[in-house]
Image (cartoon, rainbow, N blue to C red):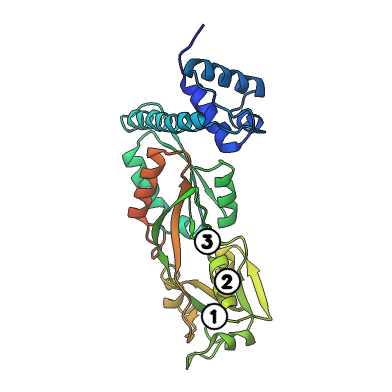
C-alpha cells in the first residue's frame, strides 16, 4: 500500500478548503467526486491525521486539518517556485492568464508584454481585454490569474498592488460649451453628459463620487467602452470625463477641448489584483513588473 503523501493529494485538499465541497473541487480539478474522496482517504492514511471534522456538516476541516492545509499551501507554493525556475531557464512553457482594461491595452500593455518575454522567454500569455467588473468576476471564477483594473473592488482574499493613478478631466468638442470661465458640476447638467457605466471600474468610482457631490445629469448617456465615449465626444454628442494625458493629442489637434470645472475629479487608482489564497511567485513577480511598467500617459508604449 502506498503511504506516501503526494502533491496531487495536497492540491486536492487545497481546492476542497477553498471551494467548500468535494463536488466543486472535483469540477475545478477536472476529475470525479469519487477520485477526490479517494485522494482524501489516502492523505488521511498517509498523514495519520483526521483531516475533516465529521461532527460538522460539509467539508469542514479539523484543527489538525487546518495545520495540514497551511503546510500544503507552502508545499504547493514551493512547487510553483521550482516551475518558475524551469521557466526562467527556458524549460516547459507556463501560462499567464492576464486581464486588462481598454486604457491599459492602449497605453503600456505592449511594454509589459515585452518585459515579461525578456524575463520569461517561454511564458505563454493569454490576454483578455474587458470591462473591470467582468475581469474581476473572471478572477473570482479562477479564469484569470491577474487583472489590472481601477481599485473599485476590495476583498480581503485578494492582493492589490498599486500601479499608479489616472487623472480624468471633462472634455467636449470645441465650441460645444463656452470655456471662457470655469463652471460648476451642476452647470454640466444643462448639457448631454457621456458617462462610463456600471461595468467600468472608473465609472464605478467616479459616478460614486459624483453622487456624493449631489450631482445628477438628466440627459446622461452611458457606455462601458472608453473608446466609444471618446468617439461620441469627438462627434459632439456631449461632454465626457476622459483620461487627460492619454487623450492629449485630441486636445492638441483641436478635436476636443478641456472644460474647466471648479470641482476637480478625483484621480482613479489602478491596481494589479490576484488571489492571496494561493501564493504564487510567478504571479507576484508579474505584478511587480507591471508596477514598474505602468504609465497611463502615452499610447502603445514598448
The residue that appears at 30% across and 29% down in the rendered structure is 89
The residue under the point 55% across, 88% down is 177
Residue 285, can we see it? yes
Looking at marks 1 and 2 on the same chain, the residue that comes earlier in the sequence is marked by 1
Quick check: 125 above or below 130?
above
Residue 248 lies left or right of residue 135; in this view the side is left
Residue pointed to by mark 3: 152
State whether residue 302 appears in this view. no
Indicate which disc, 1 or 3, sits on the residue closer to the N terminus. 3
Q: CA distance from mark 2 to mark 3?
A: 10 Å
Where disc 2 sits, the SS reads helix
Please tell me which residue lies in front, 162 or 9: 9
Q: How many numbered badges does the structure rendering display?
A: 3
Q: Mark 1 sits on what residue? A: 173
**Which residue, as the protein is rendered here, is positioned at the far top?**
1
CB under 8 Å between discs 1 and 2? no
Give me the C-alpha separation between circle 1 and circle 3. Answer: 29 Å
Q: Residue 196 vs residue 114: left or right?
A: right
Marks 3 and 2: in contact by CB < 8 Å? no
The reply to whether callout 1 and callout 3 are in contact (CB within 8 Å) is no
Amino acid at each position: 500500500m502506498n503511504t506516501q503523501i503526494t502533491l496531487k493529494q495536497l492540491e486536492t485538499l487545497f481546492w476542497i478548503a477553498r471551494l467548500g465541497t468535494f463536488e466543486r473541487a472535483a469540477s475545478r480539478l477536472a476529475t470525479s467526486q469519487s477520485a477526490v474522496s479517494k485522494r482524501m482517504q489516502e492523505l488521511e492514511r498517509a498523514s495519520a491525521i483526521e483531516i475533516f471534522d465529521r461532527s460538522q456538516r460539509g467539508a469542514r476541516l479539523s484543527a489538525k486539518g487546518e495545520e495540514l492545509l497551511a503546510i500544503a499551501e507552502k508545499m504547493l507554493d514551493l512547487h510553483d517556485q521550482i516551475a518558475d525556475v524551469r521557466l526562467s531557464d527556458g524549460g516547459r512553457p507556463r501560462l499567464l492568464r492576464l486581464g486588462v482594461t481598454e486604457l491599459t491595452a492602449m497605453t503600456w500593455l505592449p511594454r509589459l508584454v515585452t518585459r515579461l518575454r525578456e524575463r520569461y522567454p517561454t511564458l505563454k500569455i493569454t490576454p483578455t481585454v474587458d470591462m473591470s467588473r467582468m475581469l474581476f468576476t473572471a478572477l473570482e471564477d479562477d479564469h484569470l490569474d491577474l487583472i489590472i483594473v481601477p481599485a473599485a473592488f476590495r476583498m480581503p482574499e485578494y492582493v492589490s498592488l498599486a500601479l499608479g493613478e489616472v487623472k480624468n478631466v471633462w472634455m467636449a468638442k470645441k465650441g460645444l460649451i463656452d470655456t471662457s470661465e470655469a463652471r460648476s458640476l451642476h452647470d454640466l447638467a444643462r448639457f448631454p453628459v457621456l458617462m462610463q457605466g456600471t461595468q467600468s471600474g472608473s465609472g464605478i468610482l467616479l459616478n460614486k463620487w459624483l453622487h456624493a457631490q449631489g450631482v445628477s445629469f438628466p440627459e446622461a448617456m452611458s457606455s462601458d467602452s472608453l473608446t466609444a465615449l471618446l468617439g461620441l465626444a469627438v462627434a459632439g454628442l456631449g461632454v465626457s470625463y476622459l483620461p487627460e494625458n492619454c487623450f492629449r493629442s485630441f486636445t492638441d489637434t483641436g478635436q476636443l477641448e478641456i472644460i474647466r470645472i471648479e470641482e476637480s475629479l478625483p484621480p482613479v487608482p489602478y491596481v494589479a489584483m490576484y488571489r492571496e489564497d494561493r501564493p504564487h511567485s510567478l504571479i507576484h513577480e508579474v505584478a511587480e513588473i507591471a508596477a514598474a511598467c505602468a504609465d497611463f500617459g502615452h499610447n502603445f508604449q514598448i
